[in-house]
Amino acid sequence: MTLELFPLLVNAFWSGLAALGFGILFKIPKRLMLTVFVLGFLAGFIKFYTLQLNWDIAIATFLAALSVGFLAVAFAKRVAKPTVVFMIPAIIPMIPGYFAYQVILNIQKFIFLHQSSTDFTYLNQIFYNGFMTLIILFAISIGVSLPMLILGKDMTKKLKE
Amino acid sequence: MGDKHQALKNGFLLISEIAVLLMQSGANTKRVIDNINRFSSVLGFKSYALISHKSIIITLKTENQSDQHSYTNVIQIPAYKINFYIVSEISRLSWIALEKQWSCKIMQQKIEVIKNQQLYSYALTAFFVSMAGASFAKLFGGDYRSMIISFIATLIGMIVAKQAQKYFLNPYLKTYLASLAASLVASYGIYLHFGDKAHIALATSVLFLVPGVPLINSFNDLYNNHILNGSVRFISGFMTVLFIGLGLITAMILFNTKL
């Protein structure tokens, strides 16, 4: 199995750009713009790398969110800024928008295109995409909060010193 | 006696302003409480806070046990407006204030400066958010044409959201209108057959409205045992998602989009 590096880097770049866009929407301090881009880039890189290894998308997202969480705590120690500030913009590109969109699309089809009573394609799609959305959201939130829960107290002590 | 109460009252005015600013700007409940405690210890008071989604109750007490005075009041939280600059600067300020033992007046001035800081111009924000929309189109496997549609749709959605904020007070109505405008533009792209993957732009054009901050904060609050606030944030995030979906469905019905 060969891994293609170039498309991976391209995807990571766009993911970083999306993170930066959301960072600016949420008004992060100007000095953190590069940090947010790098975090978004790394999150995208890890996610698409694990996806190329044919891992499940929920696990890929979890790993990416986990590394964002750890890096955010490390960065927070360095610049003495709260973790949320660069963590949330960096993980927003991973939010399962496409699955959520598929849910809505299929709900619309289910309601307006009358299927025969033996065909459950749309219902199937609604449930599959709906649970995918939930699981990925859960993976993001756990992955990103776990490092803070483990290292959180440590950080406040460090800042006090 | 009068002096003490004046000091308590001034302290309350400062601390309640900080608490409201933090809640509005998207800090989680634990951070708000930590900051309230830090600032009140700088002023030499003990603080107790009850924080809900729309209002905050704070009690300040003097440290002296035998001759204790207290001041309690309620303050309302106006509309939420995410601003991480305020969150980060107030957190930093609390540590510096603790170190240098600032007086109430100095902190008030510093907060005023932080509050009125203009970071990014509206045009810059709109451009970068639209770039984020284009990036999403790429990440979801679109070609450059769907990226262009997504860019324009997000831009129009941003403008509508900005205008709606001026005229409507209800944030969900604002979300609905912005989502409707963005997905109408994207649907028009599909209608014109602009590229084979135009339908991807329809999914990504509304992603700038996704309530990422309430959802992440909700889980954060739940982990920290602020169950009520966590559930409130989750439900408000869920409501936003519902209204985004409603806007999307309206546009699809209007354009009779078949995918």
Image (cartoon, coloured by chain):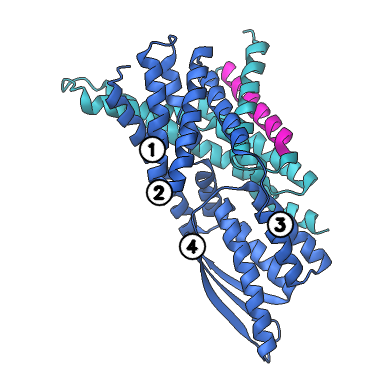
Chain colours: A cyan, B blue
Q: Are marks 2 and 3 in contact (CB under 8 Å)?
A: no
In the displayed structure, B46 sits above or below B258; it is: below
Determine the secondary structure under disc 3: helix
Res B101 quadrant in image: bottom right
Residue tagged 1: B177
Residue tagged 3: B113
Give the residue drawn at x 43%, y 43%: B164
Where residue B150 sits in the image (x, y, percent)?
Answer: 49, 22
Q: Earlier in the sequence, mark 2 or mark 3?
A: 3
How far is mark 4 from mark 1, CA to CA?
28 Å
Q: Amino acid at mark 2?
A: Phe
Determine the secondary structure under disc 2: loop
Specify whether residue A127 is in view.
Answer: no
Tell which tag, 4 or 1, sits nearer the viewer. 1
Where residue A51 sits in the image (x, y, percent)?
Answer: 57, 20
How far is mark 2 from mark 1, CA to CA?
11 Å
